[in-house]
Image: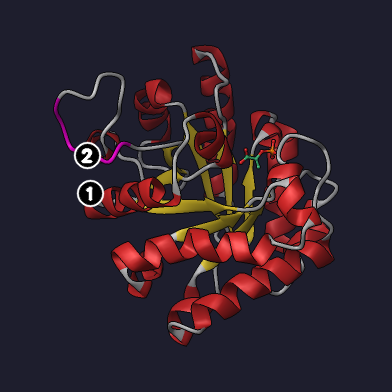
Amino acid sequence: MRKPVVMGNWKLNGTKDSVKELVTAFVKVAGDNKKVDVAVCAPAIFIGQVESLAQGSDLKYGSEDVDVHTKGAFTGENSPAMIKEFGATYAIVGHSERRQYHKESNECVAEKFKAAQENGLIPVLCIGESEAEYDEGKTLEVCQAELKAIIDLCGIEAFKNAIIAYEPIWAIGTGKTATPEIAQNVHEGIRNYLKSFNAEVADGVRILYGGSCNAKTAPELFAQKDIDGGLIGGASLKVPDFTAIIEAATANA
Ligand code: PEP
């Protein structure tokens, strides 16, 4: 039985005041909920503040990206060791916005995945196709190539200690949530692909859905057998919306 995860991705949003408001609320929600893992991934500059506010609570947190290097002349980067030092559990790697705007290749994402794991963070690997790729029927081909880069570098066993987030790019921030049927088919395809390497790893890995998931769409999405929770962008910035999404995951736990 896989424990659902509901994880916020705040992207480039937040102020000291909003971080305080959100974390204070989510610490309470996470504390009252034993069935779902609740987490927020914050801009690196706020991780220290999240640490202070979440200390000793059940709310887990992480970064939205991580560098592959441990230290040195890499101006502007944040190493996995630095993020870990602030008590983080997770590091998102390969978000489509990083792949698109920062030209991160599958191989670069795999290096980040490896660096995160080597420094005690759980990588949250984002995969997913563009609208054009969806229209051409290439969804699984794209997802498999993104997964294969990790398997080639780290081995299939690496997914024992990682989370996958399927995020169709056409659904991110657009309000066009994938239907439960579409999402379930892809999640099942992802799991079947991993099964061809190792069935036990495939059965155990949590695969989250991300892309305009909200309080309305979450219940039916989370009711699908291969959807183990959500990676939530916009709705994780609003206490009532994120709380309702966590409740939807709880109902299906
Ligand atoms: C995301 O960016 O990971 C995401 C899922 O965004 P949104 O929920 O806003 O579509």
Residue indicated by mark 1: 119
Residue 181 position, x and y percent, is: 83, 67
Classed neighbour count for the residue bearing mark 1: other residues with Cα under 10 Å, few (<14), some (14–19), many (≥20): some
Classed neighbour count for the residue bearing mark 2: other residues with Cα under 10 Å, few (<14), some (14–19), many (≥20): many
Give the residue drawn at x 31%, y 20%: 76
Location of ligand 1 given as a quarter of the image: top right
Quadrant assignment for the C terminus = bottom right
Q: Is residue 68 magenta?
A: yes
Q: Over which residues does the magenta segment extend?
A: 67-72
Tell me the number on the disc at residue 187.
none
- Circle 1 — which element? loop
Colour logic: secondary structure
Quarter of the image for residue 66 reads top left
Residue 35 visible to the viewer: no
Secondary structure mostly seen in magenta is loop
The three-letter amino acid code for the residue at tag 2 is Ala
Residue 50 position, x and y percent, is: 42, 29
Give the residue drawn at x 66%, y 52%: 129
Q: Is residue 218 left or right of residue 110?
A: right
- Circle 2 — which element? helix
Residue indicated by mark 2: 81
Residue contact between numbered discs 2 and 1, judged by CB atoms under 8 Å: yes
Give the residue drawn at x 48%, y 45%: 94
Quadrant assignment for the N terminus = bottom right
Q: Is residue 225 left or right of residue 88?
A: right
Give the residue drawn at x 51%, y 21%: 20
Q: Is residue 199 above or below residue 245?
A: below
Residue 150 position, x and y percent, is: 39, 61
Q: Is residue 15 magenta?
A: no
